[in-house]
Image: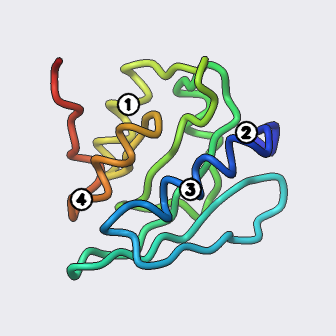
């Protein structure tokens, strides 16, 4: 975990938040060695915290090392385009009410009250 994320990926994330119709506002949360954002949503949807992970392969080890601030209803963003996450970490996160995945999954999940239940549609 940490801050090994290129500034362009952070800008890309912020641009996506600026363009999402369910995002009213967002702000960076100051936590040492981590990149986290608080996302205020519209339409009565709850506020959530998004953790921008710098992992190349997000596994159960990364999940159990996540920032303590994350709770049920939050989302872990696998930020790097070449990164991946495994199904074990995804299943554990989902069972604890935390969403996990790339930017496309986050964008869809922001429309749901419980972001951990969002499933990316099959092509």
The residue labelled by disc 4 is: 111
Earlier-in-chain disc, 2 versus 3: 2
- Closest to the camera, between mark 3 and mark 1, is 3
- What residue appears at the point 22 percent right and 44 percent down from the top-left corner? 118
Earlier-in-chain disc, 4 versus 2: 2
85 vs 44: above or below: above
Secondary element at tag 1:
helix
**Mark 3 → mark 1, Cα distance in angstroms:** 25 Å
**Is disc 2 surrounded by few (<14), some (14 to 19) or many (20+) residues within 10 Å?**
some
Secondary element at tag 2:
loop
Secondary element at tag 4:
loop
Q: Quadrant of the N terminus?
A: top right
**Mark 1 → mark 2, Cα distance in angstroms:** 16 Å
**Is disc 3 surrounded by few (<14), some (14 to 19) or many (20+) residues within 10 Å?**
few
Earlier-in-chain disc, 3 versus 4: 3
Q: In the drawing, does residue 29 fall left or right of residue 72?
A: right
**Mark 2 → mark 3, Cα distance in angstroms:** 23 Å
Q: Residue furthest left?
A: 122
Return the x and y of residue 90 as percentages of the image width and height. Answer: 38, 30
Q: In the drawing, does residue 83 fall left or right of residue 91?
A: right
Q: In which quarter of the image is residue 22?
A: bottom left
Q: In which quarter of the image is residue 111?
A: bottom left
The residue labelled by disc 1 is: 90
The residue labelled by disc 3 is: 15
**Mark 3 → mark 4, Cα distance in angstroms:** 17 Å
The residue labelled by disc 2 is: 1
């Amino acid at each position: 975990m940490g801050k090994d994320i290129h500034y362009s990926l952070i800008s890309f994330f912020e641009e996506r938040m600026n363009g999402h119709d369910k995002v009213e506002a967002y702000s960076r949360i100051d936590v040492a060695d981590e990149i986290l954002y608080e996302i205020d949503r519209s339409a009565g949807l709850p506020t959530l915290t998004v953790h921008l992970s710098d992992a190349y392969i997000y596994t159960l080890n990364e999940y159990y090392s996540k920032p303590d601030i994350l709770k049920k209803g939050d989302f872990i963003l696998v930020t790097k385009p070449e990164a991946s996450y495994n199904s074990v970490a995804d299943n554990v996160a989902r069972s604890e009410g935390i969403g996990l995945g790339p930017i496309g999954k986050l964008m869809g999940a922001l429309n749901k009250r419980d972001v951990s239940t969002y499933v990316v549609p099959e092509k």
